[in-house]
Image: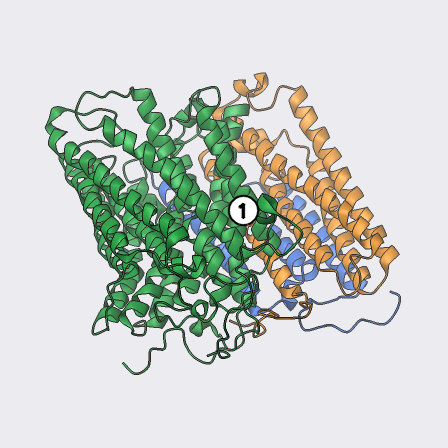
Chain colours: A blue, B green, C orange
Amino acid sequence: MAGPEPERRPDETALSPARTYVAAWAALLFFLGLTILVAKVRVAPLGAAANLLIATVKAGLVLTFFMHLGSEGKFLKIMLSVAVGALTLLIMLTFSDVLFRR
Amino acid sequence: MTEPLAPRTEPPFWVNTGRRRGLAAWMMSTDHKRIGIMYLVALLLFFSVGVFFGFLMRLNLLSPGAFIKAQTYNELFTMHGLIQIFLFIIPGVPVAFGNFFLPILIGAQDVAFPRLNRLSWWLYVTGAVIVLLSLVIEGKPPDTGWTFYAPYSIRTPANLSLAVFGVFVLGFSSILTGLNFVVTIHRLRARGMGWFRMPAFCWTLYATGWVQMLATPVLAITLVFIILSRVFGVGFFDPTRGGDPILFEHLFWAYSHPAVYIMLLPAMGIISEVVPVFSRKSLYGYVPVALSAIGIAVIGYAVWGHHMFTSGMSDTARVIFSFLTFLVAVPSGVKVFNWVSTLYKGSIKLDAPLIFALSFIFLFSIGGMTGLIIGSLAPNLHVHGTYFIVGHFHYVMFGGAGFAILTALHYWFPKMTGRMYNERRAKLGWLFLFVGFQFLYFSMFILGYKGMPRRYFDYPPEFRTLNIVSTVGSWILISGLIIIAANLLRSLRHGPTAPRDPWGGKTLEWRIPSPPAAENFRTPPVITDGPYDYGPE
Amino acid sequence: MDEPETGPGGGGAGPEPIDELGKRTGMWFFLFTELLFFGGMFLLYSIYRYKFAADFHRAAADESLALGSINTGILLTSSLAMALAIAAVRRGEIRRSIRWQRTTIWLGVVFLVIKGLEWGGKIARGIYPNGPTLLTLKNGEIIFFGLYFTMTGLHALHVLIGIAVIAFMVRFTKRGVVGPGRYARLENTGLYWHFVDIVWIYLFPLFYLIT
């Protein structure tokens, strides 16, 4: 890294040192390996759930370290939850139909 | 509230001051006021086309023994629905009055992303042209109904992919407008205008913006599925390939129900602005009214299954959706009660804007209550697919959102044009419109209850009388629309000059000249009190 | 609502300060719409996976776990490159930023090439919508491949658009339009790219890890 760290204005997101990004990337690759292992070891519904969970962890890493969601205001995090909640609601209500058909 | 008012020194916003001239000065403009006017003109033009198609449909149904062929009739009601819904009423209040007035109401110079706003306008024109093209180019116009149900929408030889693509483009326009408005409200409110000092209309635009952002993309992907199915044979909704047509309905209505709240919420916002002004009384229960907009948006997102009670969903789903449908009536009721409470003991001035607003309250209430009937599982079995439904949604969409547009047109006519319309002619037009409306649409409740199916090009003789009543009603209604339009058009040129604040309104648009200059505020306003401060009650 | 009082709105004379937070907020909102757009596809996938569990398992055997894993690694690395590119610009390291942006582009291109190879392999064997081999398969398998082409296809389209936008950013960075104090465009491009990465993070287990 050349030069001093620039001052962060209140509107700006976090500016992490390179090693933070690389560490996040390494964690992502680790979870990638883990998810492949889980798939090879067990296929049953539990495996699928575990892999979706790992995918969510990976998404969380990207959101936190690459997209700097952690240094954004509370409002943005709430609205992200609202958007995810909307999608979840869509899927759940549709399943309330498909799951219970005779 | 703001600095003392000086006489007008700047020309109106429609005078060109830059390099561009003529059409380019408008089509390339990023000024929210010009964009709002252009949208308004386009909306009213498309509305007239849609009315014409409706007129033809009713003419065909005047007596048993149709003179329009079945196929043509299918195309008529499809195009009537597509135009009125996607080209008129969904863009509706937000693109015309939201664009023109949102920045002014919050004390800003423009929206957050003016160039994105211009893109939204261009996308709207493009999408509308594409949809209308599907009507006139070689091949049959779409004939699936505006709801595009699979599998017929996949198999029909009509110009469906084109129309669907047009709607896709329109949807993109809608998403960007909603995004723009939400960021605008977050970032550009004037100093001192906290969230709960914002006019109620802005709250509804805010809630609507979120619905536009979170619901429209679901329609977008569904439309993509239709095109992929037609062009590439991807059989998601094809039973012979394992597909489930009901899934299409889920995806379609997951947007199209929230869409009715895109139509309705800003319309309710208009009423919340007009009723206090013409009662000279503060809006009763401002906070519940504001929050009810959010409530309607949130609950309204979860009720779409009530369009599918007879399609084959599980009983569990039907009960859940019916329950949620009843729940969404609560915040709507909050608004109605608060408007009526505002009127109570107010100093009522029965000018055209208030007459249209009162009509909204009356007609929307009828529409809403019939919605509760339809939202109940057992009655739904009888009235689904009948004229009862057609009556219901015309009461809420036309009697509701449509009348709100007329309210806004008259309320803000002096502000946008600098002229006053003729009050007597406005009331005369209203009378024809209102009377015609009842004949046209109330008869549909009875027809539907008696069993007349919708989207049918002909009917047995037992339904004859009510159909005559309905068709004659359409003629009276159209006369009313013509009188209203003629009055406004004439007043554009010959109406007396309007003062800055003809109605005694307290919101920010009444502090600036009629019409506004290109720059909304010479100095940014500083807000020190709420938007409906009429003094002690 | 918890954010700065208001942005720099309602100004009269004088240049408007740029509302960086507003632009970034707008980009996040756009990503929410993209979430719902892809979400509709995920909804279809989840329903049909429930209905045709066995067929999906069988059809997924056609996927190459190796290629899918490599592609996932490529996109994850491209996100790293993008993050480093933005950090470099904020520190004034223009040339380094351009190098990282170009790296992102190249990784994206490799991703698309591998995807194209996968698609080509399937198409050559008659496995594509309305393809001869596909129509002989069971209904659930037909739906699986329909979802595969649709979802990876729309995802690839977004990767392509992202590559084009980053290419523009390289030009902007070279010309100084994007710089240490004015990097909102690049940051927003990064947000978009990371989102496309997240979509793939979910697509990978759904298509490659269920057999």
* Looking at the image, residue A23 lies above or below residue C10: above
**B49 horizontally vs B340: left or right:** right
Residue B386: where, in percent of width, then height? 22, 35
Residue at coordinates 32% horizontally, 69% vertically from top-left? Answer: B277
Residue at coordinates 42% horizontally, 70% vertically from top-left? Answer: B507
The quadrant in which residue C145 appears is top right
The quadrant in which residue C12 appears is bottom right
Residue B227 or B422: which is nearer the viewer?
B422
Residue C28: where, in percent of width, then height? 60, 57
Residue B419 or C75: which is nearer the viewer?
B419
* Looking at the image, residue C183 lies above or below residue B133: below
Q: Which residue is mark 1?
A: B121
Task: Give the residue type at disc 1.
Answer: Trp
Quick one: which residue is furthest to the bottom in this view? B536
* Looking at the image, residue B109 lies above or below residue B347: above
Q: Secondary structure at mark 1?
A: helix
> Is residue B371 visible to the viewer in this orientation of the structure?
no
Residue C94: where, in percent of width, then height? 85, 58
Say which chain tag 1 marks. Answer: B
Q: Dot 1, how many residues are within 10 Å of its Cα: few (below 14), some (14-19), or many (20+)?
A: many
Residue B104 or B219: which is nearer the viewer?
B104
